[in-house]
Every structure is written in C-alpha cells, then in structure tokens.
Amino acid sequence: MIEYDFKKDEKINSLKTKHELATLEEVIEGSFDGILVTDGEGNVLMMNQSYVRNTGIKREELLGKNVREFINPVWMKNSVVLLTIEQRQPVSLNHTTKNSKNIMVTGTPLFNKDGSIKLVVVNTRDISEIYELREELLKAKEMEKYYLDQINGENVEKINSCEKEIVVANAKMQEIYALAGKVAAFDTTVLITGESGVGKELVARFLHNENPIRNKKPFIEVNCGAIPENLLESELFGYVEGSFTGANKGGKKGLFEAADGGTLFLDEMGEMSLNLQVKLLRVLETRTILRVGSSEQVPVDIRIIAATNKKLLDKIEDGSFRDDLYYRLNVINIEIPPLRERIDEIAPLALKFINRFNEKYGQNKKLTYEIIKEFEAYPWKGNIRQLKNIIENMVVLSNGDYLQLSDIPWLLGTCEKKITQTHREETMAEILARVERHVLQEAKEKYGSTRKIAVALDMDQSTVVRKQNKYGI
C-alpha cells in the first residue's frame, strides 16, 4: 500500500475524502511506472511499490525525508526533484540507481495559485530492457551487415572448383590456393600436410579439377587409415582370380587402375604399413602395378597426391616410415594451418555449412552474432570437420529459426543430453544409434585412423569401418 505523510501538507488531508484517497491510492499503486510525490521543499510525501522496485530504495528510507539527504557521488549525484524546483518546469534525466538499473526519471511541478510550488510528482520508468533491446538491435544490424557482406562476397574469395565451391577468407589460405593453382597443371607429386579435418581433401580435389587433362578422368580418394591393413593391398592393387580365399571370380581391378588417367588421392599416408610403402614406391618409380597373385606388370597413368596429419619426419626417425618414400612424395609440400589459426574463416565456413544443411533438411536456420563470437573463441581441435558436424547438429536439434548459444553442444553439456531431451519420442534403438554415431565421430576427430579408434573403443577395426560407413562418417 502507498504510505502518506499527511503532516507535511494539511491541505491534502482536508480536501480529500477517505473514499477519494483510497481510490487515488489504488490508482497510484497500480501504476507500472514508479511514482514519488514531494512537497515544494523536496520532502517525500508518498510513493508506490513500482518506485521502490525501480530505485532499490525502501519506503522507510524515503518517507518523510528530504531528497537532499540522499545526494551522493555514487548513485545520486543530483535529484530530479531539486532540479524541478530550481527550474520550475518539467525535468527529465537518465539515472543509474542504487541497484544498478537504468531508469528514466521525470519531475513535474504542481503550482499553488500564488505561483509557489505545491508538489513535485516524479515518474520513473525502468529502461534497462530498452537498453538491452537496443544492444540486441545493434548486434542484429551487425549480423545483417555480415550476411550482406557474405552475399556480396566482400573480403571473401570464392573459388569455383567444379564439384565444390571453396570459400577462402584467410591470407595464408589464399597463398595456399595460389600455390595449388600454380602446380595443378603439372603432374608432379604433392604431399599435403596438416591436422585432421583442416581441408586437405578440398585442396587435393582442387589440384585435380584445375588440371586441364586429368579433370576429365576419375578422382579417387583412398583413406589408408580406414581400410584394414589386410585388405588395403588388394583394394589398391587389385587381385587375380584365386589369389586368396573369397576372391571374386575373374579377379578385380584395384584403385590404381580405376584412377587411370586421373588422380589417386592417398589420405592418411602415415598409417600405411612398411610393406605397402615399398610397393607404393615401386609404383611411383615405374608407373606400373602388380595385382595380388599376379606377376604381370600393368601400366597406370595416374597422378598421386598424398596427405597426412602425422609428422612423417618423426615417423622416419622411429622407423615406421621410409625416408625414400617420403622424399619421393614430398616434391611439392602444401601445409594447411588449423582452423584456430584461421579465425577469419570460421564465419564464412559456418555460413556455408548452415546453408548446406538448411537445404538438405528443409530448414531455415540462421546464425546470430553471439554464435559467431563463441565459434571464434572456440579451439576447434577437430577443425573444419568438427565445425561442419556442430552446425549439422544445431540445424537438426535447435528449436527456433535463430540459433542461440544454448544450441551449442559444448555449452549445453553433452550432445547425448540434447539428443535424449529433444528426441524423447524416438525408440531406444534410435536414441542409441544417435549416441553411437556421435561417439564414433568424436573418436574420429580425436584419433584419426580406424585402427586407433578400434583400440580406444575396444572394438574390431572392421566393426569401426562398418559403423562409420553406416553413419556416413
């Protein structure tokens, strides 16, 4: 209830009936805005609860006191009541309160017939929400500008490379693609190095697509770490009929022959066994292959591009990689920096992926300023592959059109938690499949090869390969 100090103004008490005062009391107390009334000297006569809420000053602290008592250099450097009395006209000002709110304060004088000030009515309104909305609007405008910049291609180089559009915003990456463009027309062997998920396959495809002769022929990618060692040789070189139990009748061409005239991309070269390294070196030197179980040399016309996330010089030191093969592969070396060193590419890459998954899943999700800033501060140990997977996760699981910080898995807690919360209508088998896919994806980003994943998860390598194929990892 509103409290009055009638001793301060006897005229108010004599002029108002109890009914009128009760009605006035209800009206003032029902106001969303804070209301405070003083006499012409600045003595506080009444206030409503909204004023207490807006200012953080209790009734008992104010009622019957003069506003001059509250002037201080911290949260009340001046009083709108005193300014109103001094200027004899309505006065408005912004004020930061004792409880750190931003409020708009307006004082209005009421005059006696003789021209003296009878009362000062102070109105307060919390504008913190307005400030917050203003900040959100400014951020929205920044994000709108960012989208327009991306659409208009400002500061972003778009490299059209046949099958895929490669977006490059980082100066180092622009140098890398300039180098790749220079050597693409030559058949020289290229070794691409860098952490897992940085985009080595994109550079390899670019090299193939920019070659005016080989781009009309196949580009075949082989993940040397994803194929069990006992199968990799037959996959690469092919085999003749009867060469081993289960061999197809009539034999089978290997990937070297399948890539004839085009490019063979050997990813995760650091996982290849020493036995296969010897045979690969022979192919590089003779441009011929021997199918498993055959003694007939088969000529192949291919360009070989190799890639690894391992430090091959260290592997040479420990005896797990041949130095002669290393120097045969490392004619041209292209080293791709991790995503954490290419912060200026995070936003355009995120935009590229969100557009891709919106189209794939029939959604219309949008990035926000807060999301981009959080992404730019994140270390991205899984690099571009991890960013792509996170965007897909958010597009599928988020509820609103605008992605929020709460939609980011590492801020939510765990991907599994969100999966079970969002898909409660799914069967247990479906939920477990989602969790299994996530675990395998995380393991791939951490360990790289299926052999290491199998050891870490205590699974057969063939099971890891099968499940990765099942989930499209």
Image: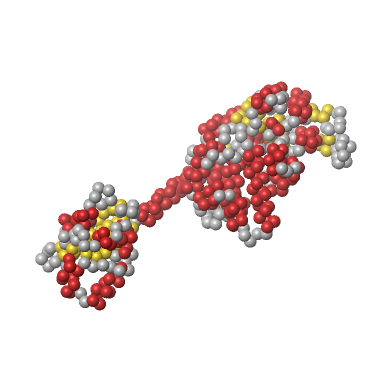
Residue 255, given in percent of the width and then of the height, sits at 76, 36
- Quadrant of the image for the N terminus? bottom left
Side of 50 relative to 343 (left or right) = left
The quadrant of the image that shows the C terminus is top right
The residue lying toward the viewer, choosing from 60 and 182, is: 60
- With 224 as the anchor, is 164 left or right in this view? left
Residue at the spot x=25%, y=52% of the render? 76
Above or below, comparing residue 48 to residue 218 in the picture: below
> Residue at (26%, 72%) from the top-left corner?
24
Q: Is residue 116 left or right of residue 59?
A: left
Q: Quadrant of residue 129?
A: bottom left
> Which of 68/441 is in front?
68
Residue 224 figure quarter: top right
Q: Which percent across, then down, holds residue 188?
A: 68, 26
* Residue 442: x %, y % from top left: 63, 44
Going by the picture, which residue comes out furthest to the front?
60
How does the figure colour the protein chain or chains?
secondary structure
User: Visible in this render: residue 158?
Assistant: no
Q: Residue at x 28, y 62 (%)?
A: 59
- Quadrant in the rendering for residue 107: bottom left
What x and y, as percent, mark residue 43? 19, 61
Which residue is at the front of the view, 221 or 380?
Answer: 380
Seen in the picture, residue 277 relative to 143 is either above or below; the reply is above
Q: Residue furthest left?
A: 114
Number of numbered markers: 0
**Residue drawn at the location 30% of the way across and 53% of the way down:** 98
